[in-house]
Image (spheres, coloured by chain):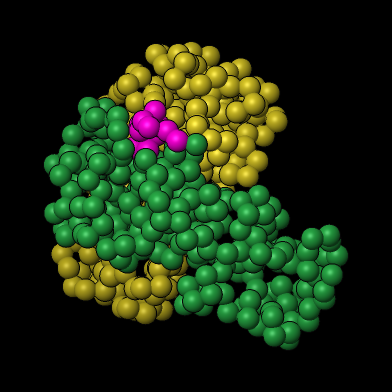
Chain colours: A green, B yellow
Amino acid sequence: MEILSDNNQKIKELAKLNMSKYRKEMKMFLVEGAHLVNEARLANVLIEAFSIDTKEGYTKISEKAMKKLCHTDTLVSEIGLCKMLDKNELSNKILILDAIQDPGNLGSLMRSAKAFGFNTIVLGKGSCDIYNDKVIRSSQGAIFKLNFITSDLVEFIPTLKDYLVYGTNVRKGISVSDCKKNGKIALVLGNEGNGISDKVDSVIENNIYIPLENVESLNVTVAGSILMYEFRGANNEK
Amino acid sequence: MEILSDNNQKIKELAKLNMSKYRKEMKMFLVEGAHLVNEARLANVLIEAFSIDTKEGYTKISEKAMKKLCHTDTLVSEIGLCKMLDKNELSNKILILDAIQDPGNLGSLMRSAKAFGFNTIVLGKGSCDIYNDKVIRSSQGAIFKLNFITSDLVEFIPTLKDYLVYGTNVRKGISVSDCKKNGKIALVLGNEGNGISDKVDSVIENNIYIPLENVESLNVTVAGSILMYEFRGANNEK
């Protein structure tokens, strides 16, 4: 067991991971709280765990050092250093996100994606950073179990030749209850305010929508999750 | 058209509405941005609208006064003073929330409730304030079209004699695909971290869950919205 002061070089290096640029460079990120540290351990992405208490399997650090590392107002007692996975194989069901910007939405969508077997998430330009601390918290551990690809969607979508690609442009879609659900599926969700961009829309042939009684719209996380739920029976893989 | 300085007594009174206590006392609340002001006008709850520009139908106020009134970092140019509605009749589908605490969750649930015909929302103890600015923003106007009741759920739920009341206690529920969906429905959702409290659970006979392929859980807004979606065909009213 090692004890690190808050001025230790290692703590300074770890604190840099609060910046997106360094996370990408170092291919590592931090997670906060016992639940996420455990999930990271189970998913084999945990490099090292830190605690303000003396605990087996944890490197002890001072409260001051912990404050330097964590984002939450209430001090967490455990933090984990995790590695980013570099998997590129595509699952049979794919969730494609065109510029989702709210971290809470991205995290909750990860949770739903995992729950309904959309094990690959493809993020286009202008998307929120996957390893943002709020995304990680909202994902509740789903982030460790998914495969992420960052790509230009206008180039990526046409490569999905054996997939049914469904956009969510309500102006030209058919009801999700009427669409084909067997085979490989890719579901494209758009930005919170603007929906799917025109450029991305131009490479998508089929669109689906959720039939609503009223003229209301739904939050993008809710809409995306209901659509993924509708495809829950299709082509599941472990 | 009236022009108000930021020290005007009226502005000071309006600024008090940023506190929950005053909202309840005065039975009024503020909404920010042109979209919500319009929605409030359409729903006949708008008392007065304010703008930093000279516009018909708006009272002009200074930028400094607007800053005193609004919550968003980027200055909005329009704000609306709205009245709280006091409706107590129950709709055929009711959403009951046991201590939902996150404003974004509450607002998004309002949006889904309106979209799927759950036109009454009943809030138990420990729930987030309905007229919190983040709730209003996330609700995207659904807040003006719903009927809210605040009540002790342990007393309220047993009064729903002609409703099918469904809790969401996963340990003892049946799949939502197998439950009865005709008749009047009340759906009870629990707190983000702890679910439905033991006391509320004790007055609920039937529970339902969403069948998931994996052992994952869903965000409460997502879970609640999928369940309301499943009841979309039941007993709709205009």
Whole-percent x, y for residue A78 in the image: 72, 62
SS majority, magenta: loop
Image quarter for residue B32? bottom left
The answer to whether residue B117 is left or right of residue B153 is left
- Please tell me whether residue B53 belongs to the stretch shown in magenta: no
User: In which quadrant will I find the N terminus of chain B?
Assistant: bottom left
Whole-percent x, y for residue B83 in the image: 37, 49
Whole-percent x, y for residue B50 in the image: 28, 66
Residue closest to the eye, A100 or B166: A100
Image quarter for residue A161? top left
Residue closest to the eye, B46 or B162: B162
The answer to whether residue A118 is left or right of residue A142 is left
Magenta range is: A227-237
Q: Residue at x 65, y 49 (%)?
A: A42
Q: In this view, does B78 lie above or below B210?
A: below
The answer to whether residue A76 is left or right of residue B135 is right
Whole-percent x, y for residue A52 in the image: 79, 68
Q: Which residue is drawn at 55% across and 53% down?
A: A144
